[in-house]
Image: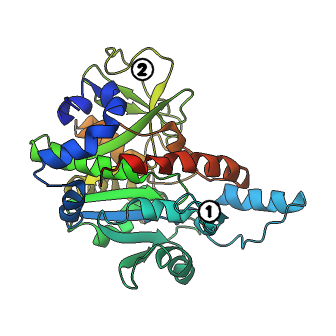
């Protein structure tokens, strides 16, 4: 890699994927670490890793019922988080099946303190996921997400409720228990954010992106490679589609594909805390809950997507094109399991790029 991290998160955004093999090693050297292992040993003291496992999962529950009605053998408690559903093992090929959430939690293991936002099932998550992955008892903290009218109100609200897990850190990484999480993407993104910080760029958000056709979560970029709009599914109505801007070939080549965020976001903790405070001050009330313009009014949610929009509007968001399209393979319904198992094998094949 002979391109600065400022360029890869800016005007030469598109070249990031081609730099994947060298990226971690060069960033480790730039940050003064003798090896990637030494780099993450230092960064882990500065970072909190939060895995979100408290989504309502209504589509998942309905799909389980439909699968059972169709005569399929589905031996799983529908009240359990879908992150506990067993799938093929790509971490140890040939090994026993493991819960879906194992991938998200393993992907960030060793990058910082471990926090999990849940709605019950703590003992089962510890027994089936954390302990088998090598976490020692007490090496994690759970936060039970409070609900409103029986429903959690978004991952932005989850981030607010678990602030005690990350407010004293420099960086906070969020990922999602049902996603095809990549250990390479997590490590490269954390190193990149630290390098930008060390060079004085001071971004509030670093969002790894992939490129794919018909992206469900398109990110529009300007001529400088900065994000200027998000097409998050959580944002209905106003602002629901990412605005189109005219970029240059290095930023947004005309290949019919769009940049898309994957299930991992990295923030400067202080910047995320400020964004959350701003959003809650404007759009939350004890009587009505959240009423954020552009969000689905029926959902009454606060999404991390809203914090991303705010940080982008402030010029504090950066993209890094290093993620595989297969990382956009969340399990939201029973029918997603086959695709997830295929894609996670490709995603975890990128361990060869970790240079450790």
**159 over 179 or under it: above or below:** below
Here the colouring is rainbow
Dot 2 falls on a residue whose secondary structure is loop
**40 over 353 or under it: above or below:** below
Looking at this view, is 194 or 237 the one in front?
194
Can you see residue 192? no
Circle 1 or circle 2, nearest the eye: 1
In the visual, does 218 lie left or right of 251?
right
Looking at this view, is 104 or 22 the one in front?
22
Q: Which residue is mark 1?
A: 94
Image location of residue 76, percent across then percent down? 73, 71
| Disc assigned to residue 29 | none
- Residue 71 lies in quadrant: bottom right
Image quarter in which the N terminus is found: top left
Image location of residue 318, percent across then percent down? 27, 37
- Residue 81 lies in quadrant: bottom right
In the visual, does 38 lie left or right of 348?
left
- Residue beneath the point at 26% across and 24% down: 12
Looking at this view, is 113 or 54 the one in front?
113
């Amino acid at each position: 890699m002979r391109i600065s991290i400022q360029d890869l998160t800016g005007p030469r955004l598109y070249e990031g994927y081609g730099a994947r093999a060298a990226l971690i090693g060069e960033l480790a050297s730039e940050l003064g670490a003798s090896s990637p292992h030494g780099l993450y040993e230092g960064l882990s003291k500065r970072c909190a890793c939060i895995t979100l496992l408290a989504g309502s999962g209504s589509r998942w529950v309905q799909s389980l019922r439909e699968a059972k009605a169709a005569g399929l053998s589905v031996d799983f408690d529908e009240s359990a988080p879908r992150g506990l559903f067993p799938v093929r093992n790509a971490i140890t090929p040939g090994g026993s099946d493991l819960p879906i959430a194992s991938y998200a939690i393993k992907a960030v293991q060793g990058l910082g303190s471990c926090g999990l936002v849940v709605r019950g099932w703590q003992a089962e998550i510890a027994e089936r996921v954390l302990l088998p992955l090598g976490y020692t008892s007490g090496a994690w903290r759970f936060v039970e997400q409070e609900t409103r009218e029986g429903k959690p109100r978004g991952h932005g609200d989850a981030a607010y409720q678990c602030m005690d897990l990350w407010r004293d850190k420099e960086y906070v990484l969020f990922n999602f228990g049902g996603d095809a999480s990549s250990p390479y993407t997590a490590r490269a993104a954390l190193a990149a954010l630290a390098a930008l910080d060390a060079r004085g760029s001071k971004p509030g958000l670093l969002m790894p992106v992939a490129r794919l056709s018909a992206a469900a979560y398109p990110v529009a970029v300007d001529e400088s490679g900065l994000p200027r709009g998000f097409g998050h599914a959580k944002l209905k109505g106003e602002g629901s589609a990412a605005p189109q801007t005219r970029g240059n070939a290095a930023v947004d080549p005309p290949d019919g594909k769009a940049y898309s965020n994957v299930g991992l976001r990295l923030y400067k903790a202080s910047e995320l805390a400020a964004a959350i405070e701003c959003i809650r001050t404007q759009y939350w009330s004890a009587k009505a809950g959240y009423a954020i313009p552009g969000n689905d009014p029926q959902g009454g949610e606060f999404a991390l997507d809203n914090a991303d929009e705010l940080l982008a509007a402030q010029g504090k968001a950066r993209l890094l094109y290093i993620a595989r399209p297969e990382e956009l393979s969340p399990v939201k319904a029973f029918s997603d399991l086959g695709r997830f198992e295929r894609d996670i094998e490709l995603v975890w094949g990128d361990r060869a790029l970790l240079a450790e």
